[in-house]
Amino acid sequence: MTMGYDFRFTHFEHDHLITAFTTSWSAPSNIALVKYWGKKEVQIPCNPSVSFTLRECRTQTTIQFDLQSSKKEEILFSIQYEGQPAPSFAPKITEFLKRIKPYVPFLTHYHLTIDTCNTFPHSSGIASSASSMAALAAGIVALEEKLNPSLTKEEQTNKCSFLARLGSGSAARSVEGPIILWGNHPESPNSSDLFGVKLAVYDNVFASYHDTVLLVDQGQKIVSSTVGHNLMHNHLYAATRFEQARENYSQLLKIFSKGDLVAFVDLVEQEALSLHAMMLTSSPSYLLMQPNTLRIIEEVRSFRKKSGLHLAFTLDAGANVHLLYPDAEAEKTRRFIEKNLRQYCQDNALIHDRVGMGIKNT
């Protein structure tokens, strides 16, 4: 369902536009519990996904909008990362601005000066595209709200998620928190393929979950997520995978309602391994896990069996491992991570994070 939203913006005459506007936003990364892998045009998921919004792994973006003397065909911008020119970011932002132009046509009157940075290393394998596109979209919607003050808070939030999705699918899940659904599902009447929505019914234990990210490999992935998604188009097991994700969402709703930590572990780990199984069985096949990824998985399983605690692993499209665990078990779990798992990280690098909320005006 799309809930009746029309995301196109009413055209304003040049004389009615703000001369200059500067705004700064912080947006979080997220970690998917039910994964999305495979999409339709344009940036529409083949199955629903659910994620924890993170608290500490964030992108901070400042945008300065300067009104030009005349409207341009394309949206003009310059981009800096940590205060330095970042030409390598330009192609992705150019494509993003091209996609969103029909929904924010006023931007063709402006030059955008974008300055961005992360609270985590850019090459660390954290989903920086999700946080960066959500922060960029938040700044653009902030200008739209100035031009159209009648926009409700709900409309602003959904428009932000809608725009962010056009830059990076997972960015649709980085606008709000703590638990976000993106993609249509019959059991959630307010769900949409166009933007993420908050899940309101869950046991509070999940809203305080921890996520420690083990940075197994901080290098460039051998296969990008964009290529990986495209390989799902003719994948032999794609239809089965999409159905599995839809069913797992139904199961996750029950798990959230009951606070069933054992079932949560089983489902989250099954989802992670299913994601990588699709990579292994793509044509051409590829492998993003590293030997230390597998060592961590075996250590986690052994620890869980011996301790009776509810530590779970999950993976994004890469070698790094996200370790999810409840707040009540954090102290014992952290000791295990430091003693047994940090050794498998590149340069002993890891990031301690936990479930948080969405975008912030800074």
Image: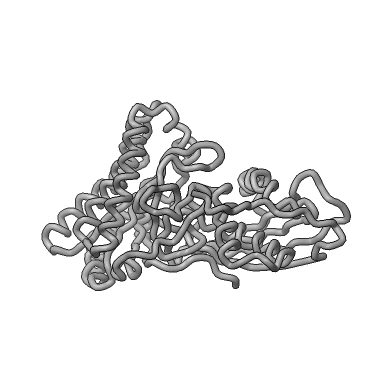
Q: Is residue 157 above or below residue 228?
A: below
**Whole-percent x, y for residue 161 in the image:** 54, 56
- For the C terminus, the quadrant is bottom right
Q: Is residue 221 above or below residue 336?
A: above
Residue drawn at x 63%, y 52% as measured from the top left: 7
Quick check: 103 left or right of 332? right
The outermost residue toward the left is 306
Q: How is the image coloured?
A: one colour
Report the residue at 67% width, 68% height from top: 23
* Left or right of 359, for residue 263: left
Residue 24 position (above or below residue 70): below
Query: Residue at image x 44%, y 48%?
Result: 183
Q: Quadrant of residue 113?
A: bottom right
Q: Nearer the viewer, residue 347 or 254?
A: 254
The tally of labels here is: 0
Left of 3 or right of it: where is 90?
right
